[in-house]
Amino acid sequence: MEKLNFSIKINAPREKVYKMMLEDESYRKWTEPFCPGSYAETDWKKGSKALFLGPGKDGNVGGMVSRIAENIPNEYVSIEHLGVVNNGVEDTTSDAVKGWAGCMENYTFRDSDGGTEVLVDMDIDGDHAGMFNDMWPKALNKLKEISEA
């Protein structure tokens, strides 16, 4: 398992950046680089289930089954990934999932020169590191764009 780290400086207050990152309408915009049409089904509260979903190539809904491990408003969000959703069916027990279940994805929001620094760190299996190294900077730039608007 690898740990990937990304960061971006956004010229907006932490409260706005946090809101833009999690609010449904803006979440759908900044996550487009990962999967156009993606969305989250969660209340973002600590301990809550989270489904990160989007349309698959075959037209069926797929994505991730996760749990909100922590949410300190305007400061920190931690997500534990537990499994996948394929064709609307959750899988948290197959051998394919067991190799990476429990991976964490964390967002930290820090004051920085009148704006906000967003830090993302995530666990990832080596097979997907290249894909996320390409997608995360694009997603964070989109978050910056909508947060600064």
Image (cartoon, helix red, strand yellow):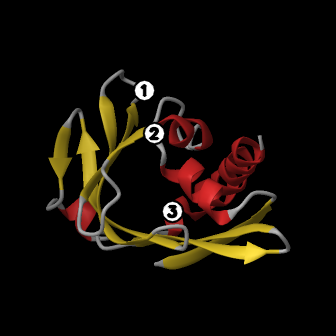
| Nearer the observer, 23 or 81 | 23
Mark 3: few/some/many CA within 10 Å (<14, 14-19, 20+): few
99 to the left or right of 88 = right
| Nearer the observer, 134 or 65 | 65
Q: Which residue is mark 1?
A: 57
75 relative to 127, above or below: below
90 relative to 56, above or below: below
- Which quadrant holds residue 146? top right
Residue at 71 percent across and 44 percent down: it is: 142
Q: Which residue is mark 3?
A: 127
6 relative to 32, above or below: below
In the rendering, at what x and y percent does residue 103 appear? 38, 72
Task: Check the picture and name the quadrant holding the C terminus.
Answer: top right
1 to the left or right of 45 = right
Of callouts 2 and 3, the N-terminal one: 2
Q: Secondary structure at mark 2?
A: helix
Residue at 18 percent across and 59 percent down: it is: 92
Q: Secondary structure at mark 3?
A: helix
Residue at 52 percent across and 69 percent down: it is: 126
Mark in the foreground, 1 or 2: 2
Kindly tell me whether residue 123 is visible in this rendering: no
In the rendering, at what x and y percent does residue 106 appear? 49, 71
Residue at 79 percent across and 75 percent down: it is: 112
Q: Which residue is mark 2?
A: 24
- As drawn, the residue found furthest toward the right would be 113
Of callouts 3 and 1, the N-terminal one: 1
Q: Secondary structure at mark 1?
A: loop
Q: Amino acid at mark 2?
A: Asp
Of callouts 1 and 2, the N-terminal one: 2
